[in-house]
């Protein structure tokens, strides 16, 4: 049972649910679990289901109706508005899909007030225990994620993880990209993905990427936005509030697939991506289920003081977080930012840590244990 199950079951009694997220993150599996024995599952990709959907010919006494891949229906937004207005969520309706469902809500859509939106993320350390042997410790879960990523099929088939990752990237670019954009630059975007896999957790310079690929900086910005919309990467931007405007403005890029980074001799970028993915998942969950305005940022100034993550709640700094491979000595940069921003809590999360401790109000704790509790 995935982490959103209980919340969707409660909310779907009141409003239609739109469930988006990365391709192959488990949306269809979750939907089929929710419908149980008597619900109705309809997939727009199945020709015989299309006529049932267009004619709204499903049983009106069903406990739940799932409309999968509905965003491929050109009139899907007006179609859903009509259903909501006519049937008042009777039977309850769950609509699933990926990129197009995830971005339409930012454009002032006609469905406002008629639905709740949830984003399903891949498995993280907090969820991993459900899929691994009972004796698996948090560190085992973390190591498994570093090896496989959190997409369920790869997570359960570690030896095929890299092949499944490449297939998923290709599938998204060949099908979802075409659905979302008219761009003809698939090869250039593939090359961009490869370059970003080498630079996970580093500052992204659009000009340098443009020079490497042989396109304009504007094209790179546009492609990264597409990759965001396709749930391949997410962008973490610098934290500014209450600080000088002269801070660095370059974003950082991480992958929804937390094992996508190329790091044969350095686990640093991998453990940073695992942490970023878990933090984004937590922020999205708090927003989708409780309406809390949480944001994930990072900090870096002109003096090159850098802290990996700053998490805010309603614009107030909740956490300052630094991630380390094996260094249990307090980061001077983290201490500086802790004293400057006065967050609710600051953490130095260490992948290999012998003993947790607290120094001047900053907790130095196990990365795996902290991520387990985050869930």
Image (cartoon, grey):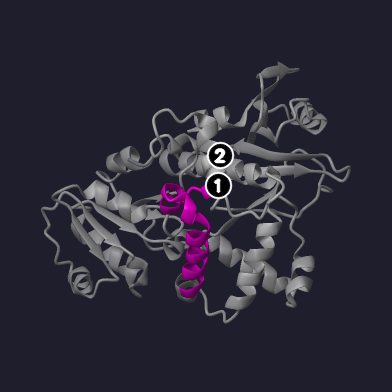
Q: Can you tell which mark lies on residue 337?
A: none
Residue 71 lies in what quarter of the image? bottom left
Q: Height in image: 55 above or below 277? A: below
Residue indicated by mark 1: 147
Picture coordinates of residue 333, whole percent (x, y): 80, 33
Query: What segment is highlighted magenta in the picture?
Result: 148-174
Q: Depth check: give the residue in front, 114 or 263.
A: 263
Would residue 22 be counted in the magenta stretch? Answer: no
Dot 2 corresponds to which residue? Answer: 143
- The 10 Å Cα crowd at callout 2, few under 14, some 14 to 19, many 20 or more, is some
Q: Is residue 293 visible?
A: no
Horizontally, residue 369 falls left or right of residue 114, namely: right
Q: Residue 70: image x %, image y %?
A: 32, 66
User: At x 68% / y 33%, what residue is drawn?
Assistant: 320
Q: CA distance from mark 1 to mark 2?
A: 6 Å
Query: Dividing the picture into quarters, in which one does residue 9 lie?
Result: top left
Instruction: Name above or below for residue 184 compared with residue 94.
Output: below
Q: Residue at the right extreme?
A: 303
Residue 79 seen: yes
Q: Residues within 10 Å of mark 1 (few under 14, many from 20)?
A: some
Residue toward you, 63 or 171: 171
Q: Position of residue 97 (x, y in %)?
A: 38, 61
């Amino acid at each position: 049972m995935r982490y959103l199950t209980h919340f969707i079951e409660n909310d779907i009694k009141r409003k239609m649910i739109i469930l988006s997220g990365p391709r192959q993150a488990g949306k269809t599996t979750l939907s089929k679990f929710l419908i149980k024995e008597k619900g109705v599952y309809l997939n727009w990709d199945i020709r015989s289901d299309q006529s049932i959907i267009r004619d709204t010919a499903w049983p009106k006494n069903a406990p739940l109706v799932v409309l999968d891949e509905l965003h491929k229906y050109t009139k899907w937004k007006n179609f859903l508005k009509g259903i909501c207005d006519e049937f008042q969520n009777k039977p309850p309706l769950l609509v699933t899909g990926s990129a197009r469902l995830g971005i339409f809500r930012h454009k002032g859509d006609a469905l406002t007030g008629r639905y709740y939106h949830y984003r399903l993320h891949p498995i993280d350390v907090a969820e991993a225990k459900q899929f691994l042997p009972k004796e698996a410790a948090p560190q085992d879960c973390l190591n498994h994620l570093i090896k496989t990523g959190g997409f369920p099929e790869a997570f359960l088939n570690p030896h095929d993880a890299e092949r499944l990752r490449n297939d998923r990237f290709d599938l998204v670019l060949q099908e979802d990209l075409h659905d979302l954009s008219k761009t003809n630059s698939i090869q250039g975007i593939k090359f961009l993905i490869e370059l970003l896999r080498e630079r996970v957790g580093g500052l992204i310079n659009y000009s340098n990427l443009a020079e490497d690929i042989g396109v304009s900086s504007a094209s790179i910005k546009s492609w990264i936005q597409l990759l965001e919309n396709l749930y391949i990467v997410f962008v973490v931007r610098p934290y500014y509030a209450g600080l000088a405007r002269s801070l660095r403005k370059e974003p950082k890029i991480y992958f929804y697939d937390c094992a996508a980074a190329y790091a044969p001799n350095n686990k640093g970028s991998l453990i940073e991506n695992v942490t970023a993915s878990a933090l984004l998942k937590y922020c999205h969950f708090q927003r989708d289920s409780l309406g809390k305005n949480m944001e994930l940022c990072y900090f870096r100034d002109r003096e090159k003081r850098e802290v990996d993550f700053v998490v805010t709640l309603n614009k107030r700094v909740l956490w300052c977080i630094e991630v380390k491979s094996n260094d249990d000595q307090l980061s001077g940069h983290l201490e500086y930012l802790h004293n400057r921003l006065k967050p609710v809590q600051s953490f130095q999360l260490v992948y290999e840590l012998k003993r947790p401790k607290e120094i001047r109000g900053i907790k130095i704790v196990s990365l795996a244990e902290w991520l387990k509790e985050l869930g």
